[in-house]
Amino acid sequence: MRNLERLISGIIKFRIAIIAILVLAMGFSGYQTLNKLSVDNSLGIWFLEDDPSYRAYIDYQEKFGSDEIFVGMIPVENALDASSISRLKGMHKEIDSLWYVKTSFSLATAEYPLYANKKILFQDLYNQKRSKKGLKNLFEKLPSITSQLVTEDFKNLFFYIQLNPTPTIEERRDIIAGEITSVIDKHFDKYYLTGAPVLNEAYSKGIYKESLIFGILTVLVITIMLLFLLPSKRYLIMALLSVAAPITILFGIITSFGYALNMISMLIPTILMVYSVSDAVHIINIYHKEGLKQEQLTKLQLITVAVRKSFTPCFYTTLTTFVGYFALYLSPLPAFKNMGIFTCIGLLLAFSLVYVIIIIGFSFINLEFDIAKPILTLKRYSQTKTINWLNAFTTQNKNRIIWVSTLILIFGLYSIFKVQIDTNSLDLLAEGKAKDDLRLVETKLKSSSRLQLNITFNEGKMLDKASLKLLEDFQSQLENSELYSAPISIVNIKQFLEKRSPVLFQSNLSSKTIDETLTRINTDNSSFYTLFSEDFKTAGITLGVKELKTSELEALMEEIEVRFNETFNDDYKLKINGFSVVFSQLNNFILETQFKSFFAAFFVAFLCLLVFIKNIKTTILVLIPNILPLAILAIFMSLLDIPLDVSTAMITPIMLGIAMDDTIHLVYKYRRGDTIQGTPTERMDSAMHYTGSALFSTTTALVAGFLIIASSAVPSVRDFGLLCAVTVAIALITDIFYLPALLKRFDK
């Protein structure tokens, strides 16, 4: 006690110096944040660089072409009009000169094969000298290719801009998107643009915008809540400073080390502000209560008592919350790792700075505790009457509460296995132009991205007749699927030549002719479709794919593999490439994150409670109610068909840590009753009266914070905020009903 008093006395003695240091730190951090805060929604944040899936995806891009592709649709009066094609050519010329563009493709640059003089040549698919009837007749013979260039009614033209591989463009995405758009604007007044680079940029802009909105809303909501929650208006400034300081300094650290916001880390400010205000409210309420009870204490003694009585429960609540977030570090996803580490640093800053700022704030305040009142009150609400009713209800109905809660817990544990693991890429994007353009283009084009199927012949080249025949059979099966569209490969060229030049296939195709033709296609670096590898052992089929859920992508790839195995023998191997393949594997990473993070958090949280309570029976009784909110969370998710996705995947370890916060404050006062004569019922009732105000206040703050996140325009983030708010509210209900009933019934 004396050491603590000396420490607090030292803080008060040097308070001006401490304030100056905090002001400088916050000023520097604010400057860093304003000048360096950025958004990183790159592929690298979702996969480790040495991850096999990520490496395979990057290798595929380098060998067979990037699928970082802008997909554009231009509405026109007549797609075959020469003026539209002329403008397209002008756009291609400018686009292709940009350093980050590999190639661009449209009706203005497309070619078709022509057999003449015993040679296969390529001519422009569009020729203004050809009649419109002749053009349409030619298009009908290349349906898969031309369907990717014009719509059936010839009212829309499509164009594609293929960028260099992902690693070479990651750091310049915002510049690239702006430059591409400005070039297109020079040539066309109206167009619709989508594709991976567009969606990625839309994600980034949405994240930056919402992070600012969340921060502003959280400050406003917390200020309004503090007007109700604090015993006096004179505590308001110190409470707000204890919230602002950790966040400001944390973001100064984040930006100084070159880190950026992403869809996950954008939630850090709101979450940390709510945690900070919760600790501040606990400390201030204890200080005020002790001031009313012990009028004879000096200010230094009173501050010391408040710090001593609040420190242990606040330390353990911070520790369990810390464990919940640190468990995210076990995730294989870098975005989750960064979220875990930065939030943990923020929690440590918040815990330490809240005490320093509150102590300094108390030192400046001379308060008459008996006449101090909150700025705003609910006149018809009596907290004392509410707690008296709760105490009586849990005493009289403890057996019923236990039975009902336990049955819900069992059903919740069953519901865990009913929760789907699925990420809908459209749920990661807010409503707006990017999403509208995507829907419109997919309606007309039946795709917005692509998959590359690479089929390798182990015993030779894919040029022989047998291999080409198998490839043709396989592609014909793919054309009948609704999951993907427009398969394009060497088969399309072969079938076209068979119709246009049947004489070519009356005798065996010479290997020399085939080699010369395919060599020209594959050595052309500007080719939009890669039909063969350089050694001709691998043939490629490009498929158009819509924005799908990860479960749908998994089903799509399973279907492809089944059809491949039905067509080819063991001498042939299939490799499916593209971002969709990597994206589909998020389900496995999410599942791994859930198991590792939750069980690590659960185990460490159990140890923390055991050390805190020092009785294994009571620890188990206390832990059970903290599982119930997660069980009810599973019930909600299964009944409402809300899946675990990239946002909600981190919810269980976080909620486990949060659920324990109120429990620890309540049990701390209850266990302190061990030194006082009284039954568990009497001690629990006393603990409810002492901590009830703080429990309701902190839960209200947490629910409000998560409801701010639930206001997000991004469906996935909205679900995360809503589920967290519901879970926190349920955690309070279990703490004031289920936990008291268990302890009153079994803790003898």
Image (spheres, grey):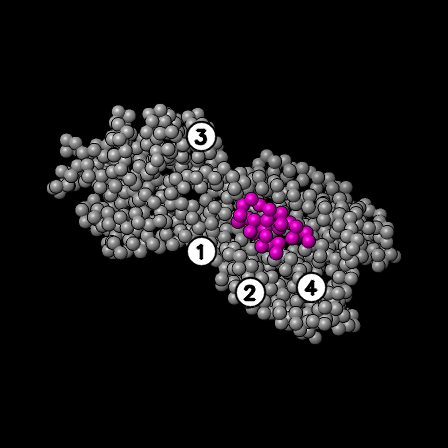
Tag in front: 3 or 4: 3
Instruction: Check disc 3 and report the residue beneath it.
Output: 190
Q: Secondary structure at mark 4?
A: helix
Q: Please name which of the two marks, 3 or 1, marks the residue nearer to the observer.
A: 3
Residue at mark 3 to residue at mark 4: CA–CA distance: 60 Å
Left-right relation of 490 to 404: left
609 or 718, nearer to the observer: 718
Identified by mark 2, the residue type is: Gly
Distance from Cα at disc 2 to Cα at disc 1: 23 Å
Q: Of the residues shown, which amino acid type is indicated by label 4?
A: Ile
- Name the disc covering residue 736, or none: 4
Q: Which residues are magenta?
A: 700-726
| 90 horizontally vs 315: left or right | left
Q: Residue at x 68, y 51 (%)?
A: 701
Q: Is residue 159 or residue 337 the one in the foreground?
A: 159
For the residues labelled 3 and 4, say whether their Cβ atoms are less than 8 Å apart.
no
In this rendering, the answer to whether 231 lies above or below 133 is below
Crowd class of label 4 (few under 14; some 14 to 19; many from 20; radius 10 Å): many
Mark closest to the chain's N terminus, 3 or 2: 3
- Between the C-alphas of marks 1 and 4, the distance is 37 Å
- Lower sequence index among marks 3 and 1: 3
- Image height check: is 244 above or below 614? above
Q: Amino acid at mark 3?
A: Lys
**Is residue 267 at least partly visible in the picture?**
yes
On the image, the x and y values in percent for residue 44 come to 46, 45
Upstream in sequence: badge 2 or badge 4: 2
Checking the image for residue 202, the label placed there is none
The reply to whether callout 2 and callout 4 are in contact (CB within 8 Å) is no
Residue located beneath label 1 in the image? 588
Residue drawn at (66%, 72%) of the image = 400
Asked if residue 724 is among those painted magenta in the image, a careful observer would answer yes
